[in-house]
Image (cartoon, helix red, strand yellow):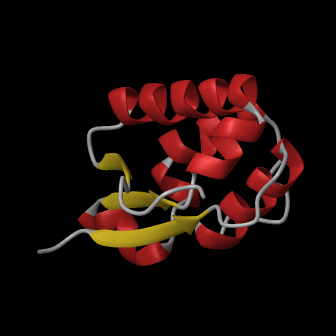
């Protein structure tokens, strides 16, 4: 059985609000998703809010086009990375991968 791969494309994301919107869309998070760091950590760690097909198979989140956001908002990006890391550490079937291809320029 293969894992579900979800692409979290951050192209054009310039702030935390846009990041949260993109996460909610890509991960198909419920309407009640709070769009804050704690809510993102909880959602990534809680299989019951993952897309249905990921609940049984596991979830890989591939973060693409993140460099511009990281350069524009380094503190927010640091927190986002910490959230991704902690959620993956807490949840055996979650892997978050940073796509290193391309450049921000």
Q: Position of residue 16 (x, y in %)?
A: 82, 43
Q: Nearer the viewer, residue 83 or 3?
A: 83
Residue located 80% across and 61% down the image: 21
Position of 36 relative to 104 (above/below): above
Instruction: Give the residue furthest to the front.
Output: 105
Instruction: Give the residue furthest to the left.
Output: 1
Of the 4 image quadrants, the one containing the N terminus is bottom left
Residue located 65% across and 33% down the image: 77
Q: Nearer the viewer, residue 29 or 10?
A: 10
Q: Position of residue 94 (x, y in %)?
A: 34, 47
Q: Position of residue 51 (x, y in %)?
A: 51, 71
Left/right of residue 73 with respect to residue 65 in the rendered view: right
Q: Position of residue 87 (x, y in %)?
A: 46, 33
Image mark count: 0
Left/right of residue 74 with respect to residue 97 in the rendered view: right
Position of 54 relative to 90 (above/below): below
Residue located 50% across and 36% down the image: 84
Of the 4 image quadrants, the one containing the C terminus is bottom right
Left/right of residue 9 with respect to residue 32 in the rendered view: left
Residue located 34% across and 59% down the image: 60
User: Based on the displayed image, in which of its 4 quarters is residue 32 positioned?
Assistant: bottom right
Left/right of residue 2 with respect to residue 31 in the rendered view: left
């Amino acid at each position: 059985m293969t894992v579900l791969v979800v692409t979290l494309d951050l192209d054009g994301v310039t702030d935390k609000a846009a990041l949260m919107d993109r996460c909610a869309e890509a991960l198909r998070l419920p309407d009640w998703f709070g769009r804050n760091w704690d809510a993102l950590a909880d959602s990534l760690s809680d299989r019951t809010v993952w897309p249905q097909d990921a609940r049984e198979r596991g979830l890989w989140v591939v973060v693409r086009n993140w460099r511009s956001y990281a350069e524009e908002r380094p503190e927010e990006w640091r927190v986002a990375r910490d959230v991704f890391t902690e959620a993956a550490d807490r949840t055996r079937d979650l892997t978050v991968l940073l796509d290193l291809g391309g450049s921000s320029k």
